[in-house]
Image: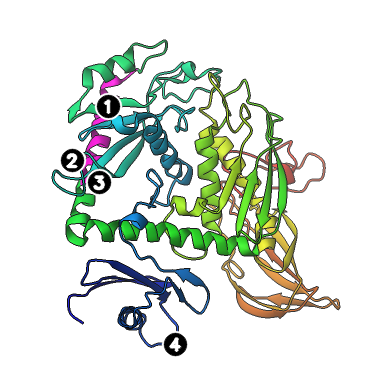
Amino acid sequence: MTGWQFRVDRGGTFTDIVARRPDGRLLTHKLLSDNPTRYRDAAVAGTRDLLVRASDGTADTASTTASATVPDETADAPVIDAVRMGTTVANAPHIPVHLGSMGTSVKEVIARRGDAMRPGDTYAVNDPYHGGTHLPDVTVITPVFDRPGEHGTPGERILFYVASRGHHAEIGGIAPGSMPANSRTIDEEGILCDNWLLVEEGRFREAETRRLLTDAPYPSRNPDTNLADLRAQIAANQKGVDEVARMIDNFGLDVVQAYMKHVQDNAEESVRRVIDVLEDGEFTYQTDSGAVIDVRVTVDRAARSATIDFTGTSPQLAANFNAPFAVVNAAVLYVFRTLVDDDIPLNDGCLHPLRIIVPPGSLLAPEPPAAVVAGNVETSQAITGALYAGPEVLEWRLPVLLEEFAVRRGSGGAGRWRGGDGGVRRIRFREAMTVSTLAQHRRVPPYGMAGGAPGALGAGRVGRAEGTVQELGGSDSAELGPGDVLVIETPGGGGYGPAPRDTTDTGIDTGAPAGTDPGEVSDDLQAF
């Protein structure tokens, strides 16, 4: 059979084969990279399967693997167009809230600009009520158009979008650095870029953007740096546009779009497998201000989907800890991505099985002119904390009960500044399991510095259901049965500096600064 072309992507868990038939149609096939009972080499087996399917005319739309049935894609134009515009295909995995919310910004530009976008246009967004997070984080978005004479009306079809986000160290507001502690309205936090046309048909709108930065109640203190940073983001986007064009030149538009759809589909299926083993749950997270984040996760087993409902969360605050919906969206995306064992990029496919409900006007969906600067950096952590709810994640994934997770008081070494205390975990097992430990500081304690004392050694043991105790080494293994308890005590940190002597009442050197309880010493160098 002549005229066929094959491309193979060997992943850690799955191998993907994309075939172009002689008639130009695309077929894709997905199978486990390692499945020795079925085949020796996944790429060879997948190529053979595609040729067999073509030769007998069946062109099946599903291929069965050892672990799942995953639809193949006959990726001609109608299917390719099913990739929803403005949904992320790949994000860098670090700084998840910072980067994971960019897709929301892109969707806002698409919704509000629509057909008005032209080749050479670029937009800037930091508006927290329309896809942004907080004002220092500026997202620059560039549509990728086809080239004249290709794929439809010459140069007017948008194929993709590229975006870059940068934290601007100064963008106005009542405090230098644009992270004011006491802001009460969005104007007090700096300059709002609401779907701002930054580049128009290739021309950087520098004069107009400078006026935006300076003609405001609390203008930017360094507009020249803002403009330089924006130029850098525009250049980064152009690099992205060029790379997308290079991919299209090398592989063809249909292959690139088919792969982008596959990346999202694979992420979606990965999250659905997580949902398959989740149970319903709810949690209330109390913040220092007294506001609460209520979250309820409800699993629809038949649909393999989940609803994340934040109804009951406190109303928006007069303070600046309000978190825009883009932050909530990114936090949910991040949490469910971390529950996936496979190595997949952070993308909107993870969100396809999830429905997020946030009450308008709440702490997690503030309305103008609410202040939001701390919501991106602080409330975002509270959202992830509420979703993880600590023990619940461990108990979702394993047949165990986390009975204790506490600070190991007194394990930090004595010193002018005491070392940080370690932790204690008590985990009761509900089923027979094998436990392995890999740990240090079971023989040599964490050292102190400048005269400080070392921290306490770590320890591990198994409390058997019948009452016996088995000590564990740092590198050890044990078989646990139902009712057995694993106890892990992590080492304390070493102290720093000679401990002041406090012999006021007992004549004993406690190792604590005079007049303090050695179990309650707290300072900036203490870490848990």
Q: Which residue lies under the disc numbered 1?
A: 198
Q: What stretch is highlighted in magenta?
A: 221-241
| Percent of width and height locating residue 27 | 32, 69
Q: Which residue lies under the disc numbered 3?
A: 240
Label 3 to label 4: alpha-carbon separation: 40 Å
Q: In which quarter of the image is residue 102?
A: top left
Please state which of the two labelled residues, at mark 3 or mark 2, is closer to the viewer.
2
Question: Residue 276 has which mark?
Answer: none
Amino acid at circle 4: Arg
Question: Residue 155 has which mark?
Answer: 2
Label 3 to label 2: alpha-carbon separation: 18 Å
- Indicate whether residue 224 is drawn in magenta: yes
Question: How dense is the environment of label 4, judged by Cα within 10 Å: few (below 14), some, or many (20 and up)?
Answer: few
Q: Which residue lies under the disc numbered 4?
A: 38
Amino acid at circle 3: Gly
Which is more N-terminal, label 2 or label 4? 4
- Indicate whether residue 99 is drawn in magenta: no
